[in-house]
Image (cartoon, rainbow, N blue to C red):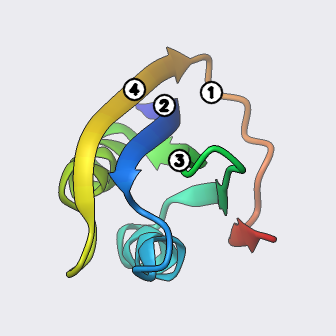
Amino acid sequence: MNVRAHIFVSGRVQGVYFRQNTKNQAKRHGVRGWVKNLDDGRVEAVFEGDESAVKALVEFCHIGPKGAVVTAVCVDWEPFRAEFETFDIIY
């Protein structure tokens, strides 16, 4: 079953390669979507794909890469839209 997750990650999540590591994990799990930094210091992302793969990516975001300190992850499960062909970092 395909799912979609829209997430916001808070903490020390910018300047620690969070976006690049998220993209690497997304490619590893076959997840499509995007990730970007927000002006308020959070990271926002949308993941689409197989339910187990998206859940694995959400779990990664609870920990983040080395150097990250994740204090909160807000996940909104939305209807699957199949709107992405790749996973991108939005600058």
- State how far apart marks 2 and 1 are (Cα): 5 Å
Q: Is residue 55 left or right of residue 42?
A: left
Residue lying at 72% horizontally and 40% vertically, measured from the top left: 82
Instruction: Write down the residue under mark 1.
Output: 80
Q: Position of residue 76 (x, y in %)?
A: 48, 19
Q: Nearer the viewer, mark 2 or mark 3?
A: 3
Instruction: Compare residues 12 and 28 and report the one nearer the observer.
Output: 12
Choose the circle earlier in sequence order: 2 or 3.
2
Residue contact between numbered discs 2 and 1, judged by CB atoms under 8 Å: yes
Indicate the quadrant containing the C terminus: top left, top right, bottom left or bottom right.
Answer: bottom right
Query: Marks 4/2: CA distance?
Result: 16 Å
Q: Quadrant of the N terminus?
A: top left
- Label 3 CA crowd tier, 10 Å (few <14, some 14–19, many 20+): some
Alpha-carbon neighbours of circle 4 within 10 Å: few (<14), some, or many (≥20)? some
Q: CA distance from mark 3 to mark 1?
A: 24 Å
- Of the residues shown, which amino acid type is indicated by label 3? Arg
Q: Is residue 90 above or below residue 55?
A: below
Q: Which residue is mark 2?
A: 3
> In the rendered image of this protein, does residue 23 appear above or below residue 71?
below
In x, y percent, where is residue 66? 20, 81
Q: Position of residue 6 (x, y in %)?
A: 56, 32
Question: Of the residues under marks 2 and 1, which one precedes in the sequence?
Answer: 2
Q: Residue at x 27, y 68 (%)?
A: 68
Residue type at mark 2? Val
Residue on which disc 3 sits = 42
Tags 1 and 4 in contact by the CB under 8 Å rule? no
Q: Return the residue at label 4.
A: 74
**Which residue is drawn at the image coordinates 43% and 72% (left, top)?**
18
x and y percent of residue 69 in the render? 22, 59
Q: Secondary structure at mark 1?
A: loop
